[in-house]
Image: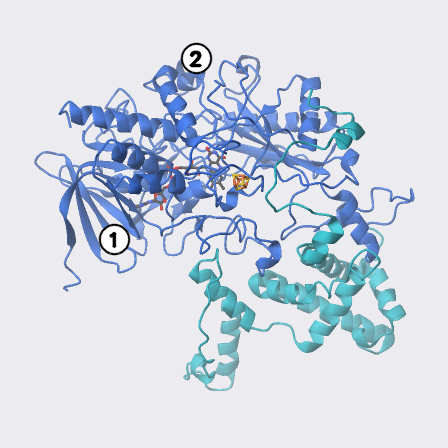
Amino acid sequence: MKRRDTLKSIALGSLGMATVPSTDLIAAPPEKPLVVPGGRQKSEAIRDAKLMADKFFTPQEMKTLTVLCDIILPADEKSGSASQAGVPAFIEFMVKDQPVHQIPLRGGLAWLDNESRKRFSKKFVELTKAQQIEIVDDIAYPEQAKPQFSQGVAFFNKMRDMTLTGFYTTRIGFNDLGYVGNTPNNWEGVPEEVLKQYGLSYE
Amino acid sequence: MNSYQIQETPEVFDVVIVGSGAGGGMAAYQLSKAGAKVCLLEAGGYYDPADPKYITQLKNPWESPRRGASTTRPFGDFDAAWGGWQLEGEPYSAAPGTEFHWFRSRMLGGRTNHWGRISLRFGPDDFRRGSMTGIGDDWPITYDDVSPYYDKVDKLLGIFGSKEGLRNEPDGHFLPPPKPRLHELMLKKAGKNLGIPVIPSRLAILTKAINNERGQCFYCSQCGRACQVYADFSSSSCLCKPAVKTGNTRLINGAMVREVLTDQKTGLCTGVSYVDTATLQEKTVRAKIVVVAASACESARLLLNSKSARFPNGLANSSGVIGKYLNDSTGASRSAFVPALMNRKRYNEDGVGGMHVYTPWWLDNKKLDFPRGYHIEYGGGMGMPSYGFGMGIQGMNGKYAYGDGKTQPAGGYGSRLKEDVRRFYGAYVGMAGRGEPIPLESNYCEIDPNNVDKYGIPTLRFHYKWSENEVKQAKHMQDTFEEIIHEMGGIALGSKPGKEQNYGLEAPGKIIHEIGTVRMGSDPKKSALNSFMQGHDVKNLFVVDAAPFVTQGDKNVTWTILAMSMRTSDYIIDEVKKKNL
Ligand SMILES: Cc1cc2nc3c(=O)[nH]c(=O)nc-3n(C[C@H](O)[C@H](O)[C@H](O)COP(=O)(O)OP(=O)(O)OC[C@H]3O[C@@H](n4cnc5c(N)ncnc54)[C@H](O)[C@@H]3O)c2cc1C
Ligand code: SF4
């Protein structure tokens, strides 16, 4: 975030307005009362509120991101899709929370559009499903991908990581996984039939 | 009010205690129970894991916009620590070519709100490694001096474990241990085949209620978030609050102590001065006895900063030893994939907030090329997903056949990934060695000549390098991990760290068991404190955290801090009765 502020003032400087403090140029947003959620410290709540008010991806980028997320985790007979689980919004938050993800993801999305234009003279979201998959197939298999796609592979690995994490940390993901913990219970050991399955016992 | 005027509380307390972690909390409890008027000063804010304002326990990952990632809290959004490796406005440094990582929490109860609850008594040998091996030093006391206090701490605060009759892992007063989880049974079996003991762990968690103030564990696996029924031990809930309840302890939060005050004529402490962190006002508390428990390095810093004409090297430091012999546990780890655990049946396997089994040190160093032992902590199971879950699946999913017997190329997309996550879930184990280092005079912290924190208090500069002894120990850990993994039919992940990586030996400080910076001993020329952790030079000054400890065994030290603080508190009561204080 600091870096973005610097960029902003450099841009202003190049317009010959360097003497104007850049913050004065932006109308202060109306003050919303800050709510500190339970379990958070005030400084964390302030930071989170600011991140949530910011926007990183453009609407166009969000569209591409959403299409990709749903290619990675589509709805099927077992569970919903990545976008149904809110994964794109999670990724939008994460790139603001951890700016190291910003360039690889923004740049990766641009790489994808470049590749789409090269092959089909259209942006990725405007391609047919079959065309999208043709490109994705070139970058989704790290051990088989041709060397000229290595940047695409790195981008897709990152997208796969973010999509899986974003999906399985939701109720939809919990249900798909069959995670049944995080609730008061009485641990009485491994169920009998499981012990039997593994040939183990409590003696 | 004149803001430059130093505010002084009119009353003179019997005891002022600096810091409310394990050491300070125990002293406040024990002394106020005995009727002493105590002032407990804590730099951080008030904290109560049962107050909805602070509760993170039982929250789901989606209640954090970052799904529990560690962006702002080093152990993730739901961890109870208010602090971390860096604190805003309170820096520290390390001399070039050396390294030390310092974890601090600024809150009532300090780091006991989110610690791992692993509570291992020292054994008889742990107090006399120096004379046993010719390397390092002995404590000025023996196991017999401390064991009655371990017993009292066990009963007062609660710990589970099993009676094993191991000579150097003495049994305590244990509550029933939780049964091993599935991967823990596999580890146990592997250990048995290899002659490596795998026994019930010893954690400060109430598997049975011990009083009306604290509830019983309901197996949510989240002690790091602090327990809202107080079923895990935290100094805040189990010591500080009961101390305040006696009516004899006045707790002041947001009190960052800068200096211990002394009378230049008598050479005795008269109290402390602190910065009120909310108003930045300087305040003073007068007391007949000063007990320092700010955590090992903070306590050294406070004493070194308490310089005066009479104590030009810092308080109680005529020996010059304060800051020296800083040492942290060694640590190295490895994880593995266990194919037999693929496609597991689902059930709630959360258990307590930590391992149900561990491996105590089992070998004889006389037959090894390094002088001290280590224990092994285990992880694994069907845990709750949080940030990071599912990442790196392309490293796994090309290697193992699906239900139809076919493999598919690594990576990919689509429903197949959902199947991958389901089949690999809960099929991993992790193991971490925690070993005893040799405390060295050349590993130390000192006052940084050039830097102060935001309160104007001079900060610490660290000097720390591992020696060959610790590196060899880490090598042995790595070999053992591979043996165990192999024996349980697992596949070790990543490559084995070699010599260039010090065999995966973690950087100093990373294991967060720092001790030794205000040494106790019988020789005032070589130690700052006597065998009751009382200043050789200043008899109404006591240090009751891990700073006085000569060595740390391979036993995470908090249970020993509690026992030693209780012992010193009883000594103070006794000495006051005898009018020696
Ligand atoms: C993630 C984690 C896991 C751990 N797991 C284990 C484990 O399983 N087993 C184990 O034995 N140990 C474990 N530890 C270590 C354990 O937390 C410490 O040994 C223990 O808390 C030390 O107690 P203490 O009283 O010395 O200091 P702390 O608990 O650090 O408390 C010191 C207190 O003093 C306050 N303070 C500091 N300076 C000042 C000042 N100048 N004025 C006023 N107040 C001050 C601090 O704010 C703090 O509240 C773990 C630690 C961490 C972080
Ligand atoms: S595991 Fe038990 S003691 Fe730990 S937080 Fe959960 S309920 Fe409390």
Whole-percent x and y of residue A163? 71, 59
Identify the hue of chain A: cyan
Q: Which residue bears the numbered disc 1?
A: B275
Q: Chain of mark 1?
A: B
Amino acid on which disc 2 is placed: Met
The chain shown in blue is which?
Answer: B
**What SS does tag 2 mark?**
helix
The residue positioned 57% from the left and 18% from the top of the image is B362
Horizontal arrangement in the rendering, residue B7 relative to residue B486 (left or right): left
Q: Which residue bears the numbered disc 2?
A: B132
Front disc: 2 or 1? 1
**What SS does tag 1 mark?**
strand
Query: Real-space Cα distance between discs 2 and 1?
Result: 46 Å
Q: Chain of mark 2?
A: B
- Reply above or below: B560 against B101: above
Whole-percent x and y of residue B156? 39, 29
Task: Classify residue B492 by image quadrant.
Answer: top right
